[in-house]
Image: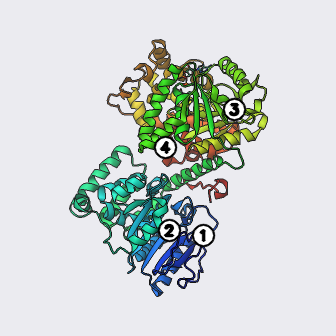
Amino acid sequence: MTQISDSRHTDASADAAPRDADPWRHWRLERDADGLAWLTLDRAGSTVNTLSREVLAELAAVLDALTARPPRGLVIRSAKPAGFAAGADVDEFARLDTPEAARALIARGWDLYARLAGVPYPTLALIHGHCLGGGLELALACRYRLVADAPDTTLALPEVMLGIFPGWGGMLRLPALIGAPAALDMMLTGRRCDARRSAALGLADARVPTRLLEQAARKTVLSGRRPRRARGLPALLNRWPLNALAAAQARRRIAQKDPQGHYPAPPAIITLWQRHGGNALQAPALLESILASDTARNLVRVFRLQERLKAYGKAGDAAPVARVHVVGAGVMGGDIAAWCALRGLTVTLQDQDAARIAPALARAGKLYARRLKDRRAARAAFDRLVPDPDGHGIARADLVIEAIVEQLEAKRALYRSIEPRLKPGALLATNTSSLSLKDLRTGLAQPSRLVGIHFFNPVASMPLVEVVNGHDGDTAAQARACAFVGAIGKLPLPVRDAPGFLVNAVLAPYLLEAMRAVDEGLAPETVDAALTAFGMPMGPLELADTVGLDVALAAGRQLAGQAEPPRCLAERVGRGALGRKTGSGFYAWRDGKPARRQAGPAPEGLAARLVAPLVEQARRQVEAGVVQDADLADAGVIFGTGYAPYTGGPLHQHTSASQHRIDPGDTGNPD
Ligand code: NAI
């Protein structure tokens, strides 16, 4: 028997058995002495396997070759270190322009995967890294699935996040495999499963240490074991009459999350699963309406904007940051330090004394327990976060982040004491939200080493970080800071030094307009309800309470140039009702939650009125060059505030309506 230790690099089987001539650009087919066929996906010219039309056409040809000379078993795997397959090619989807093209795209994958599912020999998907969308549907069409027991193993059907559905057989095979409740949850939320969860759900037959994957694949594919299927109640919920129950429950959950129906894909997924056996080709009108919807187009736009931000976070030739020192262990500094350690960096955390660092460490412990299910990994992250009241870490850090009180003189004094201790080439960053970098740089011996790295609160859940430009147009420090932000799994948005940068500058006039509506007599509940119905993750008054009304008042003065603050704001700040942190503001706060009364009916056009100043300010920030262009402003506002993604962004929505397309050349597409 010829061992194929790693035929990604070698062709160990060549002498043992004849090999199919490899006429394919993206697939490699090898046969071994056991009669097994090993099919490796390695999409040409790309670091990830996306399933383009050409990749699928070649897979059909591979299946032809296998039909002509059937193997004893087939193992499908990937040659890309990053993962198995990332799903359909988003660019091809975005180019669909006719209903026929939309149907053809679905039929292409549906038919091909049905063919794979029907081959007479056993098949197995050997999965490492990401296995998403059409990639997971490919794996589902195999008889068995094994996943690498590694931290980067990720299985998901994220189509719903692009406003579409898993049309290549996922809606048929996933519920059959793991039962309706778990499958609907995955399909309707795009939720990701790691190796452990995949095995627990039955999505994978087993999780296997990476070094044993091939051996396990060989054994499993030839085992003759019956393929897994859902059993018991989860299986019954797939079939009439109980499927109606599962569908009704899922519909209720969707309606709670999206009462206005801004997102048409989730209800369509339920209908396709319940009434059409997961086959969208049986419901052509629904298929076309979803694939051609503005929502899908806009969500694809948001996806590409995200890719563009991610591209700023790629290292390029910037020197990597391995050690971080954070000064200020308060709300922000403590959480920034904790996040960096979670993401694998070695972090020292400084404050005026150890007692002020302790609460940050306690919060970090909770974060790690929540995020890292594995106790050893949580312990390791905690060990990487070192309390350092005396600032010993400064001299060894590649990056020092300052997050002390928002006072110019305090920050400058700190820089004076830190700068001489920095190692050559180390970057100094401030988390300031309102001070000018120009002012902060005065007094530094090397002003070009100070950049702004502006995180949002709460650090762990906010994906965006604004990276404020370097001294005198120096782009190297900003690029390095962006690469650091990318390395810790956040989305960097390069911005110019200007009051409020982008995100706070657009939020301030929006929050003030909401408060004016309260001055006019509307209840906070009514105002907030109008905006959550519009699609905001949180109403503006709840947001103001969360940020702190003193902060909102100061931001209003600085950013909106207002003469008189709204009465409701001044009055609350005057009596010390500063929002969540004091227990009352626009709402009374209990256990971190606002106590709300029933919202009243909102006047016609309220949401549009409140959003208008945000849109106008976004336009002004673009004109002033705070961000490079309108697309980046949309990206920043969506990822920095949660602005209703189905709209495609504040400027997109108000300029080119639904026809706007991004030039793929502009988006920093990872391919
Ligand atoms: P905070 O008041 O919670 O924490 C500041 C910490 O810095 C305190 O623990 C204090 O003891 C410490 N500190 C003060 N002077 C120090 C010194 N010389 N050496 C060492 N430690 C010192 O403040 P917060 O909210 O964390 O803000 C920090 C920075 O982050 C500010 O520049 C603020 O504008 C910015 N920011 C705040 C956001 C928020 O939502 N709170 C959001 C984004 C940025």
Residue for point 43% across, 65% down: 137
Which numbered marker is on residue 118? none
Say whether disc 3 or disc 4 marks the residue closer to the N-terminus. Answer: 3
Q: Position of residue 467 (x, y in %)?
A: 65, 37
Q: Type of residue at label 1?
A: His
Find disc 1 in the rendering and name its residue: 9
Depth check: 177 or 245 in front?
177
Q: Name the secondary structure under disc 1.
A: loop
Q: Type of residue at label 4?
A: Ala
CA–CA distance between discs 1 and 4?
46 Å
Q: Name the secondary structure under disc 2.
A: strand
Say whether disc 1 or disc 4 marks the residue closer to the N-terminus. Answer: 1
Q: Name the secondary structure under disc 4.
A: loop
Marks 1,3: beta carbons within 8 A: no
| Name of the residue lying farthest toward the front | 1
CA–CA distance between discs 1 and 3?
49 Å
In front: label 1 or label 2:
1
Label 2 crowd (10 A; few <14 / some 14-19 / many >=20): many
Q: Is residue 294 visible?
A: yes
Find disc 2 in the rendering and name its residue: 77
CA–CA distance between discs 1 and 2?
13 Å
Find disc 4 in the rendering and name its residue: 644
Say whether disc 1 or disc 3 marks the residue closer to the N-terminus. Answer: 1
Which numbered marker is on residue 497? 3
In front: label 1 or label 4:
1
| Above or below, 614 relative to 269 | above
Residue for point 35% across, 31% down: 599
